[in-house]
Amino acid sequence: MKAMVMALISLFIFSLFITSSGEISGQPGVNYGELGNNLPTPTTSVSLIKNLKAKRVKIYDANPEILKALENTGFQVSIMLPNQLITNISSNQTLSNQWIQSNLVPFYPKTLIRYLLVGNELISSTSNQTWPHIVPAMHRIKHSLTIFGLHKIKVGTTSAMDVLQTSFPPSNGTFRDDIAFSVIKPMLEFLHVTNSFFFLDVYPFFAWTSDPININLNYALFESDNITVTDPNTGLVYTNLFDQMVDAVYFAMERLGFPSIRIFIAETGWPNGGDLDQIGANIHNAATYNRNIVKKVTKKPPTGTPARPGSVLPTFIFALFNENLKPGLGTERHFGLLYPNGSSIYEIDLSGKTLESEFKTLPPAEDYKGKAWCVVAEGANETAVVEALSYACSQGNQTCDSVQPGKPCFKPDSVVDRASYAFSSYWAQFRHVGGTCNFNGLATQIAKDPSYGSCKYPSVTL
Ligand SMILES: *[C@@H]1O[C@H](CO)[C@@H](O)[C@H](O)[C@H]1NC(C)=O
Ligand SMILES: *[C@@H]1O[C@H](CO)[C@@H](O)[C@H](O)[C@H]1NC(C)=O
Ligand SMILES: *[C@@H]1O[C@H](CO)[C@@H](O)[C@H](O)[C@H]1NC(C)=O
Ligand SMILES: *[C@@H]1O[C@H](CO)[C@@H](O)[C@H](O)[C@H]1NC(C)=O
Ligand SMILES: *[C@@H]1O[C@H](CO)[C@@H](O)[C@H](O)[C@H]1NC(C)=O
Ligand SMILES: *[C@@H]1O[C@H](CO)[C@@H](O)[C@H](O)[C@H]1NC(C)=O
Ligand SMILES: *[C@@H]1O[C@H](CO)[C@@H](O)[C@H](O)[C@H]1NC(C)=O
Ligand SMILES: *[C@@H]1O[C@H](CO)[C@@H](O)[C@H](O)[C@H]1NC(C)=O
């Protein structure tokens, strides 16, 4: 009897293994972010995703219109539980059940929901008061899925690279002390028992911009054939920054006792534009990076990474559209494969079947060189601009002298013009010590001189 049970159990585990590894594909999906006020309808967006030949679609909520538009399309879909609900759901099974019942059940299985992510980069974007609730919320959600008989949906949560304390060399990869044992270890236990994935957001672009002198751009773009980094502890040889970052996480998981959890790339990408002073963010590099990541993850047999050779790396590219309402630096609003009007920013085929030579030649990769000014952004909140203006004028030397009555830039007597002067004047004085042209998103960089008559706006030279 006992032997029989054991045999059944091992058969069960064996078949679990077969089906789960059989169903996972390397053909990438796309992150469908919705932070734009000029984006196409869900139905149009879904047909654009088809044209890109994506395999999967990830959204940052459970938008019913999008889930409806994804019905009967064959896309594997990843939905997300909003960050604000994590704490309440972690202690309330009824609430968890209700969320599943009203957000997921109505669409399943016509919409092929395969992944349910419990929050987005919670460690990076919420206070440590939320962190203890992450894993309990994952358990609640998993339990709710079981109650509704939804056994094929994997539960996870996304992490950015800032969950690591050490990432170089990759074999030294270690989770941060403040989360390793309190949050990450129980999370890995959950992912292990449920045969789910560690969902990771990986941006070689940000790693490279933090140290462009020492990190070679081509190494970050998968374009270097003569630069390698050897991990002195393992002897593993790296030919690109992405593999290095992913392996650091594998090693960190292994250090906590979980060597077999698979990584799912929840986001990766490269910006096609940005602020004038942001280097490396252009169409050429974005196309190069994204085409190369597609080539990498669709290769058959799979290449994996140096620490996990041969493993499949399921991936979502970030993102479908340039999203004009994303806060932060200009690059944040330029990660799209498509413009908001639906046209391609550059050619890409997520199936990996189009050869590089079949694509049209890309524009050259050029950073902006010349003078730049910092002016009020279109649509900026005027009350907030008044506050930012008075802040800017209070900083530095003679920052706003020229806009005083009787001075060259006093006229036209408008808040936007005066603030644009103040922002430019502030940026010109403080850029060399790290001052930025941002003012909480109220400001933007321009290359066209706003000076007029005898009113000369201070500039920076990039
Ligand atoms: C969480 O629960 C508390 C107490 O029931 C409630 O006041 C609060 O509005 C809930 N938060 C959210 C985001 O639903
Ligand atoms: C749990 O959630 C349910 C459904 O939203 C709500 O009615 C109930 O008051 C919550 N329980 C507690 C203890 O907050
Ligand atoms: C949470 O963060 C606060 C402020 O950063 C810190 O003072 C506190 O020690 C942290 N608490 C824990 C449990 O890590
Ligand atoms: C690994 O990290 C430790 C401290 O985190 C450091 O002392 C050590 O030098 C690192 N090893 C290598 C090979 O860099
Ligand atoms: C790699 O090749 C490039 C282009 O051929 C060359 O400019 C560069 O110096 C080489 N770098 C190294 C480290 O050999
Ligand atoms: C779509 O938008 C881009 C960027 O604004 C523009 O260059 C392109 O001409 C537009 N395409 C169409 C078909 O309107
Ligand atoms: C505009 O900014 C002010 C001051 O920062 C703020 O109180 C107000 O809510 C903002 N208005 C809008 C529409 O965002
Ligand atoms: C303002 O002037 C003082 C005295 O000349 C100088 O030390 C300081 O660096 C100036 N500040 C800026 C932001 O240029």
Image (spheres, helix red, strand yellow):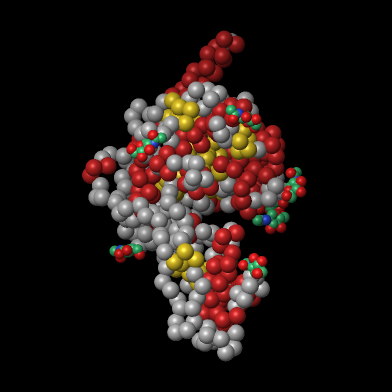
Asked if 236 appears above or below 2 in the picture, the reply is below
Drawn side of residue 149 relative to residue 446, left or right: right
Would you place residue 246 above or below residue 31 in this image? above
Image position, residue 56 (x, y; %): 40, 43
Residue 406 image point, x, y percent: 57, 89
Q: Residue at x 56, y 86 (%)?
A: 407
Which of the two residues, 100 or 210, is positioned nearer the viewer here?
210
Q: Is residue 314 visible?
A: no
User: Percent position (x, y) of residue 448?
Assistant: 41, 71
Residue situated in front as seen by the camera: 136 or 253: 253
Quadrant in the picture for residue 313:
top left
Classify the position of the N terminus by image quarter.
Answer: top right
Q: Residue furthest bottom?
A: 406
Query: Where, by quadrant of the figure, is residue 261 drawn?
Result: top right
Q: How many marks?
A: 0
**For this rendering, which residue is in front, 264 or 270?**
270
Q: Position of residue 130 (x, y in %)?
A: 68, 48
Residue at point 26% right, 50% down?
A: 361
Q: Residue sitting at 35 percent across and 45 percent down?
A: 288
Q: Nearer the viewer, residue 40 or 374?
A: 374
For image coordinates 52% across by 40% down, the residue present is 200
Looking at the image, can residue 373 be seen?
Answer: yes
Q: Residue furthest left?
A: 358
Instruction: Say if 295 sits above or below 380 in the image.
Output: above
On the rendered structure, is 83 left or right of 52? right
